[in-house]
Image (spheres, grey):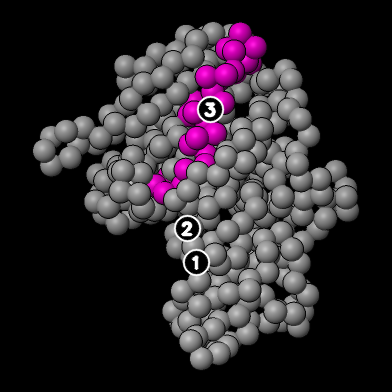
Amino acid sequence: MTYDNRTLVWGELKAEPGQFVTGMVKVAELSHRGPVLMPVLIVNGAKPGPRLWLNGAVHGDELNGPMAIRNLLPALEPEKLSGAIIATPISNPLAFQARQKNTPQDSLDLDMQFPGDPNGTLSQRLAHLLFERIKEMATHLIDCHTLGTHFQALPYTVFKRIPAASSEISDQAERMARAFGATAHCRVDLGGSLNELPGNVSGFLDVQCQIHGIPAFMAELGWGGVLQPEIVSFSERGFLAVLHDLEMWPEAPDPAPYTAPRTITRRRFLYTDHGGLCIDGAAPGTVVRAGERVCRIVDMFGTVQEIIADEDMYIIASRQNPPVDTGDRVAFVGLAWEQEEDIDE
Ligand SMILES: [Zn+2]
């Protein structure tokens, strides 16, 4: 594939080849007529190459990815970069402002609205505005997420295989996710079972990117509502590793801290049948064998439910905020996986 070397323009923002620019772009207006502004950072490399889009805070309480983006980009010399990095670290500024996952104005999950609607609600318009720019500028994309605030997890990546995307695009997405170097990679086959992911799966940014020929994956970077310095630096390293793998950046970063990641091919949530406090949860990154306990639900008088694995489970995420009601999620687990050494490249 050949790439042109060109000036990137977004509203008032203009990045010539060899320039790093930052600025705010207007994405909406509030009732008092004040603008809603979104921060944009562009490193336009001196040499031609792929254009990697880094997106963050599509869910407003997810902070580790945005911090990694704002730390890394100013440190990259444009003279050494082939291609460009376009970053929207706070892609849902209204949810970010509200310290919550969804957009307060329409209560929608922005990551279920892509490719968006220019005549819809605020989230749908924001998705449209973003996605038009992504289609125009990006050749690759990383969407930075975290788990919800009630969970804890080691960093992992998710790549989706979608019937509507070419296998070449899916393969590139998977390669990027592996290059990122997390503890586990979840391969989600959207041609098969959809029931592990609630909601409008076709509206996910990474799904729409792949349908439009842009290899993309999700990085799940810790959990929401907090900044986790070790996960922020892990994420900076991950971005660099993808840049190097795409031949955009000359130097390889230090090896990933996780040496034998798993590729998880089937996942599900575990739920509690009772209210109480969820305690003694198995740690993320560990395997719970069939018949062993994943966690238990207790009340003020004793144990009300032992959550027992009915098959072997890899703990992707576990509950860290104990109070639960009937039907609350207590863990997110992998049910089938391959260890990296077993995979024939
Ligand atoms: Zn998210």
Which of the numbered marks, if any, corresponds to residue 149?
Answer: 2
| Residue positioned 78% across, 34% down in the render | 255
**Residue where numbered disc 1 is placed:** 321
Q: Is residue 55 visible?
A: no
Image marks 1 and 2: residues in contact by CB distance under 8 Å:
yes
Left or right of 184, for residue 75: left
Q: Secondary structure at mark 3?
A: helix
Left or right of 126, for residue 290: right
Find residue 25 and report its image quarter.
Answer: top left
Which of the numbered marks, if any, corresponds to residue 71?
Answer: 3
Residue range highlighted in magenta: 58-87
Q: Nearer the viewer, residue 247 or 293?
A: 293
- Which of discs 1 and 3 lies nearer the camera? The answer is 1
Residue 211 image position (x, y, % from top left):
54, 44
Q: Secondary structure at mark 2?
A: loop
Query: Which residue is outermost to the front?
Result: 300
Q: CA distance from mark 2 to mark 3?
A: 23 Å
Q: Nearer the viewer, residue 102 or 195?
A: 102
| Residue positioned 48% across, 87% down in the render | 300
Left or right of 130, for residue 3: right
